Amino acid sequence: ENMAYKRKIGSNKVLINRMTEKLSEACMKQDLSAYRLSRLSRIPLTTILHIMDGSTRNPGFYTIAKMCVVLGLSMDEIIQEWDWKEDE
């Protein structure tokens, strides 16, 4: 049971890292600073910065969704390469 829990935590890290990379890439492509993303999404700047630097272990769905709306991304796009079978 403990190994399954550790595996789950590890797979969540990979997913969050991929989401963070996709969000950061979208910001760079659009020349959008974290400050500007914060203003447009109405998400606190510290939250944006923690998501982008990976220090947030479990960003909220609605927070990520709001960032996606501003960046013109779908949730599918930011988790696109994820192998969901790994979680089963």
Image: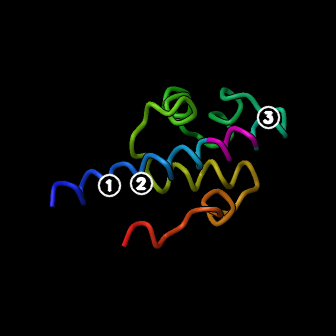
Label 3 or label 1, whichever comes before in sequence order: 1
> Distance between the Cα atoms at labels 2 and 1?
6 Å
| Neighbours of disc 2 within 10 Å: few (<14), some (14-19), many (20+) | some
Using the numbered discs, state the Cα–Cα distance from disc 3 to disc 2 in whole angstroms.
26 Å
Question: SS at mark 3?
Answer: helix
In this rendering, is residue 40 above or below 65?
above
Q: Is 3 inside the magenta-drawn segment?
A: no
Query: Cβ–Cβ below 8 Å for labels 2 and 1?
Result: yes
> Is 85 in front, or is 34?
85
Q: Which residue is mark 1?
A: 7
Left-right relation of 34 to 60: right
Which callout, 3 or 2, points at the residue further toward the start of the chain? 2
Label 2: which secondary element: helix
Report the number of numbered marks. Answer: 3
| Residue in front for this viewpoint, 51 or 42 | 51
- Per the picture, the main secondary structure of the magenta-coloured stretch is helix
What residue span does the magenta drawing correspond to?
21-25
38 left or right of 1 in image: right
Q: Position of residue 17 (x, y in %)?
A: 54, 43
Identity of the residue drawn at 65% across and 64% down = 80
Q: As shown in the figure, which amino acid type bears the numbered disc 1?
A: Arg
Residue 17 placement, left or right of 26: left
Q: Nearer the viewer, mark 3 or mark 2?
A: 2
- Return the residue at label 2: 11
Q: Which mark is residue 28?
A: 3
On screen, residue 66 above or below 44: below
Q: Does residue 42 appear to the left or right of 34 in the view shown?
A: left
> Which x, y percent locates residue 84?
49, 70
Q: Secondary structure at mark 1?
A: helix
Toward the viewer: 38 or 79?
A: 79
Marks 3,2: beta carbons within 8 A: no
Does the stretch in magenta take in 22? yes
